[in-house]
Image: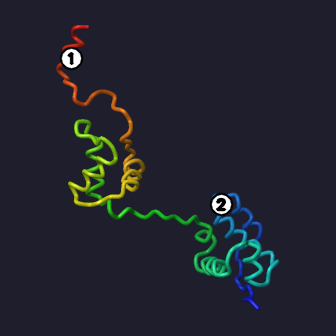
């Protein structure tokens, strides 16, 4: 025989159903379903409820413990995995930012940025991680063509514009 469900649900059934419109991910909706099914007293054992929700019993136990400890708001909150990338330090980040904004000393591609970091900071950065950091955190793109040639002579351009 399995464990008997003994977790008291403090919220009313109506308030639990109102939370449904506020949820935007699958995992939180499953958690809310577990509370609604517990509140309606349809299931008496953990195994039955876990089978209905198509989750493992240990996952259901963890969810119910989290509900008891944290309350409904934190229980339904979306889990985030915003962990910083440890190889690209703030110094490397600032140097990349400065180099990306320098039109006379720009990168020829992500591979060039990867080599530059290896030579300057003596750190090996994965290509995909560097691409992700530059495009998402710095908002840069190395594949866009420049508006004009960076090696052009500004004085020659002015002289040309005067003759036309």
| Residue occupying the far right of the picture | 42
Along the viewing direction, whichever of 55 and 7 lies nearer the viewer: 55
Residue 115: x, y in percent?
A: 26, 51
Name the mark on residue 104: none
Asked whether the residues under the numbered discs 2 and 1 touch, taking CB atoms below 8 Å apart as contact, a structural biologist would say no
Query: Is residue 122 shown above or below 34?
Result: above
The quadrant where residue 62 appears: bottom right
Front label number (2 vs 1): 1
Along the viewing direction, whichever of 33 and 87 lies nearer the viewer: 87
Give the residue number, with chain letter if any, for mark 2.
23
| Residue occupying the far bottom of the picture | 1
Give the residue number, with chain letter if any, for mark 1.
158
Q: Is residue 164 left or right of residue 24?
A: left
Query: Is residue 163 shown above or below 60?
Result: above
Task: Indicate the secondary structure of the residue bearing disc 2.
Answer: loop
Mark 2 burial class by Cα count in 10 Å: few <14, some 14-19, many 20+: some
Give the Cα distance between marks 2 and 1.
60 Å
Residue 12: x, y in percent?
A: 75, 72
Residue located at (67% from left, 70% from top):
31
Mark 1 burial class by Cα count in 10 Å: few <14, some 14-19, many 20+: few
């Amino acid at each position: 025989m399995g464990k008997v469900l003994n977790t008291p649900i403090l919220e009313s059934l109506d308030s639990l159903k109102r939370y449904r419109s506020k949820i935007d991910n699958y995992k939180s909706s499953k958690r809310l379903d577990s509370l609604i099914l517990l509140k309606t007293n349809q299931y008496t054992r953990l195994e039955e409820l876990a089978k209905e929700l198509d989750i493992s019993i240990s996952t259901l136990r963890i969810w119910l413990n989290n509900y008891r400890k944290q309350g409904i708001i934190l229980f339904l909150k979306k889990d985030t995995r915003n962990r910083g990338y440890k190889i690209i330090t703030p110094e490397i980040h600032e140097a990349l930012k400065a180099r990306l904004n320098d039109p006379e000393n720009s990168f020829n591609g992500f591979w060039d940025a990867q080599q530059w970091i290896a030579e300057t900071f003596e750190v090996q950065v994965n290509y995909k991680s560097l691409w992700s950091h530059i495009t998402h955190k710095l908002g840069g793109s190395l594949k866009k063509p420049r508006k004009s040639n960076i090696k052009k002579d500004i004085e020659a351009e002015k002289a040309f514009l005067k003759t036309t």
